[in-house]
Amino acid sequence: MTDRLWAPWRLEYVVGQRPGGCFFCDYWAEPGADEANLVLLRGRDCYVVLNRYPYNGGHLMIAPRQHVSRLADLDDAALAEMMRLARLCEKVLTAEIRPRGFNVGLNIGRTAGAGVDDHLHLHVVPRWDGDTNFMPVLDDTRVVPVALAELWRLLAPAFRGEGGHETGG
């Protein structure tokens, strides 16, 4: 018997049209659409958003308000806030979904693997023992065990409880 992998949220990515412009900038400009855009927390210069096409359940991105592609072009306040938010992401994800580790990093430039290479963003990817399997190796497919809307409803209150809109240091 053949097992089926059901991941309906991926269909939009596979067949959907790619909108013009920068969705990171659009999300910053639409504070009233945070749930629809999967934005979990807004700081002064950066925000935390669930990755709509995640590598793993709970895959977050931290994006600055500034539309820059390189660390050298990011102002010091945004750079500092990005790291404070990364620390907060680790804390909230640990409390809410209990990963055993994290991958945290930047892909600067398309050659380095950036899917969005004109707007810098930091990935925070929770990891669990045994969360790797044959799917990415055989078919470049990842299995994510939770729906994004459900995950947003779980994490958003936790982020608000950990400092709301304030991320000052």
Image: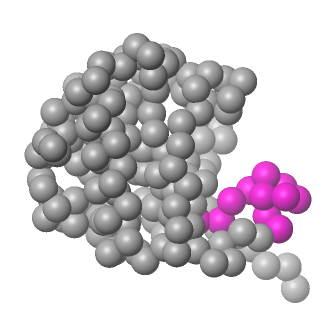
Query: Per the image, is 139 magenta?
Result: yes
Q: Is residue 151 visible?
A: yes
Q: Quadrant of residue 80?
A: top left
Counting from the top left corner in percent of width and height, residue 126 is at: 50, 63
Residue at image position (79%, 79%) is: 3
- Is 156 within the magenta? no
Question: Where 93 sits versus 34, above or below?
Answer: below
At x 43%, y 77%, the residue is 98
- What span is in magenta? 134-144
Percent position (x, y) of residue 142? 68, 59
Q: Nearer the viewer, residue 158 or 135?
A: 158
Label tally:
0
Residue placed most toward the observer, 84 or 42: 84
Asked if 153 appears above or below 112 in the picture, the reply is below
Above or below for 129 versus 141: below
> Is residue 53 or residue 91 the one in the foreground?
91
Which residue is pictured at 38% across the width and 71% down the height? 94
Residue toward you, 115 or 149? 115
Which quadrant holds residue 22? Answer: top left
- Where residue 38 sits in the image (x, y, percent)? 33, 48
Q: Residue at x 44, y 16 (%)?
A: 72
Q: How is the image coloured?
A: one colour
| Residue 60 left/right relative to 107 | left
Taking the image as shown, residue 108 lies to the left or right of residue 81, namely right
Q: Is residue 1 left or right of residue 161?
A: right
Q: Can residue 37 be spotted in the picture?
A: no
Task: Check the picture and name the quadrant holding the C terminus.
Answer: top left
Q: Position of residue 75 (x, y in %)?
A: 30, 19
Q: In the rendered view of the protein, which quadrant contains the N terminus?
A: bottom right
